[in-house]
Image (spheres, rainbow, N blue to C red):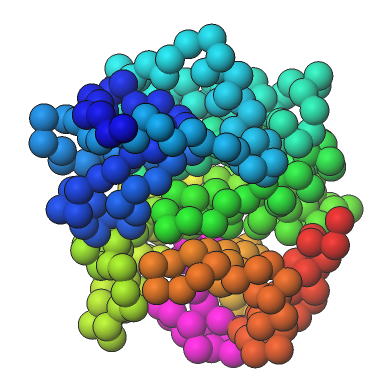
Amino acid sequence: MDKLVAVDALQIGMYVKLQDDSIKGTGLEKAFFITDPGQLRQIRGLSLRYGKVYVDLDRQWQPSPIDDMSHAAESEKRETSVVEPESSPEQAQQNSVDRIKQAASDPSMEPKKKAAAVYQSAREIMQTLFECPTAEFIKDTKEAVGSLVDMVLEDEEAANALIKVTQHDYYTYTHSVNVGTLSICLAKKLFQTDTASHDMRELGAGFFLHDLGKVRVEKEILNKPSRLTEAEMKRMRIHPYQSYKILQESSQLSEECRVIAMQHHERDDGTGYPLRLKGEQIHVYGRICCIADVYDALTAKRSYKEAMPPFEALKIMKNEMLHHFHREIFNNFVMLFSK
Ligand SMILES: [Fe+2]
Ligand SMILES: [Fe+2]
């Protein structure tokens, strides 16, 4: 039975049906189970007639074991209360920052649960940041990423679980969390005997914010459900420099970490952009981010392609794209998935 429900009353687990005109260019499906708070916020951000959507009350969401794990923290919350709309983006962001800090530093939380809770909060934080890329929100994000970095450095089990909990959808904020997480795990592996020489928290923020400049690319290009034309690609290629500029304007990161934003699309053989840098001209931080970025782009689901399984993506990177990467860093990246 379909019923019109106000968007503020939507809850995780509901099967929602959306009108074609309201989802155009958003990457959202027409009908789906709401499985995370990010989707809730995205639906609330749509322009909807009367602020209501249809919900099929007969359909019950059955979480798979992996969903179950990912949404453990959310389910616990639902048992005691309905999802309440947060009063403002600032409040929502503060709540997410508090949740990530609490979960990341909770010694009693089981590693898989901890990783799932941290991952979900990180996605919420990045979603808000992409909606409001202000200096204040960049500062909040840096603080939250710092907690995630501490967890990765201190809790090996939770760090491994974090790699496995990654989801693959259409959203730039999910991509940012995946690339940020994988890059920080790779940096830990590469600098393991020498993490003191690198500001890992600062570095983590650089990885998470590498694509922030996409907020300055037109939404129609960003959300285009098919492949981009050459002209659209040209617009898209402004984003590394724009990420760099936003971070510079906000004075939130060191120059070394802003380099990540600028260089994450450079390729070892000089075929990347924006500066066509080659080999040693590319900073090690940029090289790390480049590998994680390509991997996540291959494994992500797009409306014009299915998600590629992790092993398949690594195989393609090794057999067809190795000239794009620093070989030793790539070998270390592959090892992240052997645990
Ligand atoms: Fe990028
Ligand atoms: Fe990226």
| Nearer-the-camera pick, 57 or 182 | 57
Q: Position of residue 11 (x, y in %)?
A: 40, 26
| Nearer-the-camera pick, 208 or 103 | 103
Residue that lies at the very extreme toward the left in this rendered image: 49
Residue ID at (71%, 89%): 319
Q: Position of residue 311 (x, y in %)?
A: 73, 71
Q: Left or right: 19 with respect to 124?
A: left
**Magenta stretch encompasses residue 21:** no
* Residue 68 vertical position relative to residue 253 in the rendered view, above or below: above
Q: Quadrant of residue 238?
A: bottom left
Q: Is residue 114 visible?
A: yes
| Nearer-the-camera pick, 283 or 328 | 328
Q: Position of residue 85 (x, y in %)?
A: 33, 19
| Nearer-the-camera pick, 73 or 156 | 73
Q: Left or right: 159 with respect to 224?
A: right
* Residue 320 vertical position relative to residue 2 in the rendered view, above or below: below
Residues rendered magenta in the picture: 256-279
Q: Position of residue 271 (x, y in %)?
A: 50, 89
* Main secondary structure of the magenta stretch: loop
**Magenta stretch encompasses residue 261:** yes
Check the picture and name the quadrant holding the C terminus.
bottom right
Q: Left or right: 322 with respect to 160?
A: left
* Residue 115 vertical position relative to residue 168 in the rendered view, above or below: above
Q: Is residue 141 visible?
A: no
Residue ID at (76%, 36%): 112
